[in-house]
Amino acid sequence: MASGLWLAPALAGSLGDTSNAFNGYTLESPLADYPALKLLETWQADLVKDVGMYENPGETLTLNDVPIQKIRYRFADGLLESVQLSYQGRGNRDKLLHWVEDHYGKVPAPEHLMTRMVLWYGKQMTITLIYDTYSKRGWLWFAAPALSEQINRTLNDMPD
């Protein structure tokens, strides 16, 4: 099911070259900068020796009246690779889309309200907003492109 999400139509916008942070977390900053984070799981791969998923216990977040259900922080070799948020509901997806556009820039097509995936690209950060109409769940990622590519290339190169 998850792989089908990536095949959905997508629209893209661009970020400024200086955008690299979300909610006080700066991408590619060291894990030591965030002592409140607690380790959930780790794994290793060829291109990234240490990948860790973390959370901040008790952390809550609301964006544009959307309650975020889960917040995860992924580190690659000790550097913040991404902040991953999950939410429920199509209406919340639309509110998050407007929030991202207000804070990071508009997507240049009015059809974005009908698209399952919307992307914003920058040199230091990418933002991905996804909504799955079947499960009515969605995800919002803030990621460092260089570190994400290393993790994704490693995952794609792993044998089946």
Image (cartoon, rainbow, N blue to C red):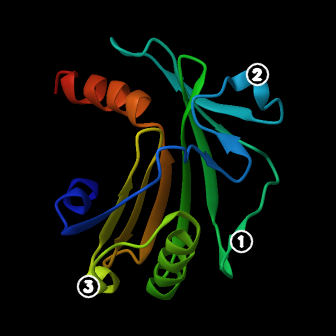
Single out the mark in the foreground, 1 or 3.
3
Where is residue 153 drawn, in percent x and y? 26, 27
Q: Check disc 3 and report its element: helix, strand or loop.
A: helix
- The answer to whether the residue labelled 1 contacts the one labelled 3, judged by CB atoms less than 8 Å apart, is no
Instruction: Return the x and y of residue 33 as percentages of the image width and height.
Output: 77, 27
Q: Does the residue at mark 1 contact the one at mark 2 (Cβ under 8 Å)?
A: no
**Mark number for residue 111?**
3
Snapshot quadrant of residue 64? bottom right
Circle 2 sits on which residue?
Answer: 32
Q: Residue at 26%, 68% (x, y): give it.
A: 11
Q: Mark 3 belongs to which amino acid?
A: Glu
Q: Can residue 114 be seen in this view?
A: no
Left or right, residue 80 beside residue 44: right
Is 106 located above or below residue 144 in the figure? below
Position above or below: 61 against 151: below
> Label 3: how many residues lie within 10 Å, few (<14), some (14-19) or many (20+)?
few
Disc with the residue nearer the chain's start (1 vs 2): 2
**Label placed on residue 62:** 1
What amino acid does circle 2 point to? Ala
In the structure shown, which secondary structural element does the residue marked by tag 2 occupy?
Answer: helix
Q: Position of residue 81 (x, y in %)?
A: 52, 33
Cα distance between the residues tagged 1 and 2: 25 Å
